Amino acid sequence: MSIVILDEHTRDKIAAGEVVERPASVVKELVENALDADAKRIEVRLDGAGDAITVTDDGCGMSPEDLSLCIHRHATSKIRTADDLALISSYGFRGEALPSIAAVSELEIRTRPGGSDTGNRIVVSAGNVIATGEAPSAPGTTVHVRRLFFNTPVRARFLRSARAELARAVGMVEKLALARPDVAFRCESGGRLVLHTPGGGDYLETLLALAGLETAREVCLGSAAVVGARAVALVGSPATCRADRRRQGAWINSRPVSVRGLVEAAEAAYPWGVLPGRRHPLLYLLMSLPPEDVDVNVHPAKAEVRLADGTPAFALAAAAVRDAAAARVLAGAADIAGAGLRAGDIAGAADIAGPAAPPGMQRRVRYGEGPAGEPGAGTRSWPQPAGRAGHMLAVGEAPAAWDLWATDLSALRPLGQVGASWLACDGPGGLVVVDQHAAHERVIFEHLGAGTTSPGSQVLAIPAAVELSPGDFARWTAAEEVLAESGFVTEHFGGTGVLIREIPADLAGARWSPEPLLVDILAALEDEARAAAPLGPRLAARRAVASCAAAVKAHQPLAGPELSSLLSQLASCREPWRCPHGRPTVILITHDELARRFGRQ
Amino acid sequence: MRFAAAQVDLVQAVQTVQRAVTTKSTLPVLAGILLTAQDEQLALVATDHEISIRCSAPARVEMPGSIVLPARYVSDILRKIPSGEVSCEVDEGTARALLLWQRSQFVIYGFAAREFPQLPAPDGARKLEISGRALRDLIRRTNFAVSRDDIRPVLTGALLEISPQRVAVFATDGYRIAYAHADGDFGGQDSMSVILPGRALGELQRLLPDGDERIEALIGGNQVYFRAGGVEFTTRVIDGTYPNCRAVIPRDYRATLQAGTEDFLAACDRASQIAREGVQMVMLKLEEGHIRISSETPEIGSAQEEVQAQTTGEPLEVAFSARYLMEALRTTDSDQFMLEISGPGSPARLRPVGKEDAYHIVLPIRLD
Ligand SMILES: Nc1ncnc2c1ncn2[C@@H]1O[C@H](COP(=O)(O)OP(=O)(O)O)[C@@H](O)[C@H]1O
Ligand SMILES: [Mg+2]
Ligand SMILES: [Zn+2]
């Protein structure tokens, strides 16, 4: 797409104003340009007090002509006429950012369009072109901003400390990274890597990379949708509550935005008791709304958007939070990944968060045109949420998630084992059936991650030597360290041999040997790596160890005390309702359901 | 074949050999007992390829011969027959046995004797003589530690080290090691060692007389033959190299404790009730004059026990599996025991006080 200068009429339609207020806004504009250029990897480098900013992308690049045009006001490749404004799906459209930045800094752009083998550069200082010409460049674009605000001392004085500005700029990258899990982000500040996301398209892995496991495991996810609009809410447990709202935010159509009252409306639906003075839980709203409903043309920095009257956004946001609460799916992102957010759902979330079609004019999303109210043909479609995110039950119709959640697992009366795989229990709400394997998996998974209460690792008297297949050996090499963190201490033993020195205490016993366990775990790790939504290595290791350990314990006949013990261990889990892979550990067949089945209703 | 014998003698003989009967084999004949009537005796043999047991009962043999009868029916029926004489007539052509007593008669279908595998003759280069009690004790004090998973076949057996003056046994499942020895005059000249299956040793332990009565063993390359009283017991030998357990024994210790076995065992047992199922981890903390045993499970509660003990060395704190500690303590056969600790990640040795004839190596649970 080539750049044209917008006509007068169109220019006037665009809200005027300054785009560049501070380093963070420069970062935002440059990253958005990279996203609009279809980049898959974006690197941001911040130096000094945030007055030196470099954004490198592997996007489509610019031709020499476009390069010389792009620094002119209202030069954009993204819209042509005022009509296009209603259907904006790219981040930029004003053609304002680069000229504004160029006016207050020294700007150098190096770019090379795909398919061309020469690169070009342009250097601009305080709005004046200083140099142009061919220059070596990798495919994509690097925008290098130096001496930001050097010629506007007043603006410079409004800036806060370097630390604060840098933090703000990093925060901006974080928001954009969260908006676009399909893009790999790296951000260095003062030479230190402060943020990186894998870019696999997995929303949850991105959250994990950004927020860390400790936070991610406190988060649960819910969703709500009506025709043409959908909300996903990432809601933190009370443990994530803070006095400020720094860990709250909204994204609409992949754009970090602020909408008056939206987060507040969602927070009002938050059901958990919260400590006084710490009133704001982690709350991220990812919404997909028809572009017609979203007026992004309010503020030049586009941070604040206005929603059309009658938008379902507020109701959806609250519903999504309630859904998250009902599901209470949280726990390790592992669980998020599994819990009701299997591949499809995650893709759904990612989809909401990121444009699926190539950005640009062709990505016009129209809603309500498809059959049966599905999003219209030619647009991205959302996978239907698998029931409700975090649904608990498959029996009967509406899953009685709340009923089950209200069930005190430790108060269940075990009735006995069914088919050596399930435990039947009498619960207050009905018949509760526990999947022995899934329950063990959950229990072991949490033990492995439990830190201080970790069961530790049993040192072996006779270290066990295993000769691995080359494939297993390669997997072992990659996983050695994380396995050790899970209590599986191993070392290389010549060739493809591995010596097992310690195993998780949970698994020690004369009944099973460490060798096959290691081989099984390596196989399980391979499955984890192949999963639709691969996890970080630590979670993957924990999950693999847990499932193999559970497999070892499965199909064991359990007698009375062991039944109760498994139940009480499950009850004491943070997230008893699902195994680390997201399958339910427990189902409830309500009294109503039983009555109905027996034709008594 | 025709014979008559006393019901009690038959029941006893059947029960003795029955432990070697297997129903899991692809050879159905191994679910039976080979009966051979000859020389005023009825010989009974059962085998499952790993072990075989042979014994005999006094009988009045009218016509010698042999047959294989299904162990389950023979033993059930014999036990329910009133005491007195039972006679048995066998049609070897059809492999049927007719059991007669008082006015009852039962027909049992069996197998022809030639279908029963030929047992290797007693054979072995090395002879061992040991009292029944000593061998029983050695097995009792070690055999519990063998592995029950046959991934590492050698660990499913115990290592017997035999020399003219000492018989020593090692058993380990890879998690802990049990050792015991007996001194005496065991015959033979050279020293040798052999790995015997844990299950075989368990059966042997049941069969051995509990007295000073000496039993005889012949140790061969792939089987060991025992003769104890009228019972002959043969077991297969496990091939392979047994791990060098002595290498695991630490050379020096950072702390020791000596305490009353019963007290400590009971305290450990109680504390482990609070420990999480499956791991049963207890913390041992050595303090001046006593040892503190504690356990904690967030969802259950916590336990603290204090047991009087003489402690030396560093005030270490080490976690162990209560199960391994308790299994070791139960076989120290001594009022007082000594635990020598070399650190939170290194082997510890547990042994009786006042005796040098046994020890256990228990490995800690590492917590970092
Ligand atoms: N990283 C980039 N890769 C490719 N093209 C870019 C990049 N940054 C800017 N451009 C081009 O420069 C134009 C002007 O950018 P900008 O001033 O931010 O305006 P806008 O994004 O509103 O169109 C864009 O429309 C695009 O064509
Ligand atoms: Mg732009
Ligand atoms: Zn699972």
Image (cartoon, rainbow, N blue to C red):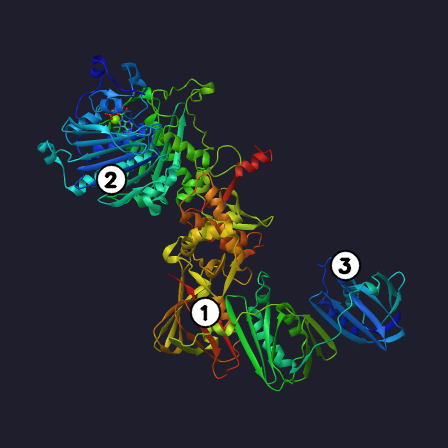
Residue A303 vs residue A554: left or right? left
Residue B28: mark in rendering: 3
The residue at the point 60 percent across, 64 percent down is B153
Asked if the residue under mark 3 is in contact with the one under mark 2, i.e. CB atoms within 8 Å, the reply is no
Residue nearest the viewer, comparing A130 with A21:
A130
Report which residue position mark 2 lands on. A45
The residue at the point 53 percent across, 73 percent down is B178
Same chain under badges 2 and 3? The reply is no
Please state the horizontal and vertical placement of residue A329, each as a whole percent of the image.
41, 41
Q: Which quarter of the frame holds ligand 1?
A: top left
Residue type at mark 2 is Arg
Q: CA distance from mark 1 to mark 3?
A: 47 Å
Residue type at mark 3 is Pro
Q: Quick check: can you spot residue A310? A: no
Query: Which quadrant of the view contains residue B93?
Result: bottom right
A469 to B85, vertically: above or below: above
Please state the horizontal and vertical placement of residue B48, each as a whole percent of the image.
71, 65
Q: Alpha-carbon neighbours of circle 2 within 10 Å: few (<14), some, or many (≥20)?
A: many
Which quarter of the rendering shows the C terminus of chain B? Answer: bottom left
Report which residue position mark 1 lands on. B268
> Which circle, 1 or 3, is nearer the viewer?
3
Chain of residue at mark 3: B
